[in-house]
Image (cartoon, rainbow, N blue to C red):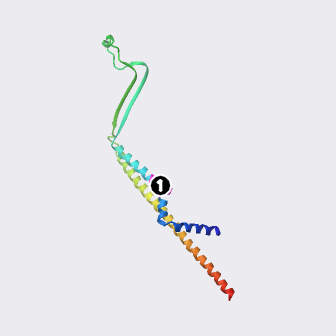
Amino acid sequence: MKHILLLVLLSVSYLEAETLSGLINYAMKHNTGVLQGKTAIELSRASERMSEAAMGGEFNFVGSATHYNIERTLAPVPPSAMMAKKPITTSKEIFSAGLAFNVPLFTGGAQIHQLRIDQLGTQIATIKSRLGREEVAYNIRILYLSLLAQDGILTAQQHYVASLKKLASQIRTE
């Protein structure tokens, strides 16, 4: 019983130093559930942006490099080129690079539906985050008020004990 009273006294002394709004603000900044909700919202917004970007097509950089052990001709060699005095163009390493733009012409509405699904996912994540924040605030309010009630009960018990002692002393003197 003494340990419980000590815990209540320490809790109440801490509560007197901190306001309810201060406790709620602290919890909103440091609660892992609230932080996970914020991260879920950011993730769903990123998914939504990716779906929007996929509708506009994409640029791709393409390139290749080939290395041969022996030299290869780079163009067809006609008989007149074989008779010419200049050497035939050859290479052991062939490189190519380019830029491609791909845009889907018809997807059957899949991209539009995916965008709508991602928008709904963002709304769900926002609602879940808001619900989590309200739940944390509610729990803090309940704990705060119950600790204040325990403080009131402790004060009442102390007054009751003092009254009983006073009554007992009066009974002894009479």
Magenta highlight on residue 83: no
Q: Is residue 10 above or below residue 65?
A: below
Residue at (67, 86) in percent of width and height:
171
Dominant SS in magenta: helix
Residue that carries the numbered disc 1 in the rendered image: 35
Tell me residue 3's x, y (percent): 64, 67
The C terminus sits in image quarter: bottom right
- What's the residue type where badge 1 is placed? Leu
Q: Nearer the viewer, residue 86 or 29?
A: 29
Q: Is residue 170 above or below residue 50?
A: below
21 vs 102, nearest the viewer? 21
Q: Position of residue 83 (x, y in %)?
A: 32, 10
Please identify the quarter of the rendering in which residue 72 is found.
top left
Task: Identify the element where label 1 is drawn.
Answer: helix
- Toward the left, the furthest residue is 80
- Observer-nearest residue: 13 or 60? 13
Image position of 95 (left or right of 156): left
Drawn side of residue 139 relative to residue 78, left or right: right
**In the image, is residue 31 above or below residue 68?**
below
Report the quarter where the N terminus lies: bottom right
The image shows residue 157, relative to residue 133, as above or below, that is: below
Q: Which residues are magenta?
A: 29-39
Mark 1: give few (<14), some (14-19) or many (20+) Cα within 10 Å. some
Among all residues in the image, which is located at the extreme right?
Answer: 172
Rendered location of residue 110, percent (x, y): 36, 45
Residue sitting at x 44%, y 54%: 38
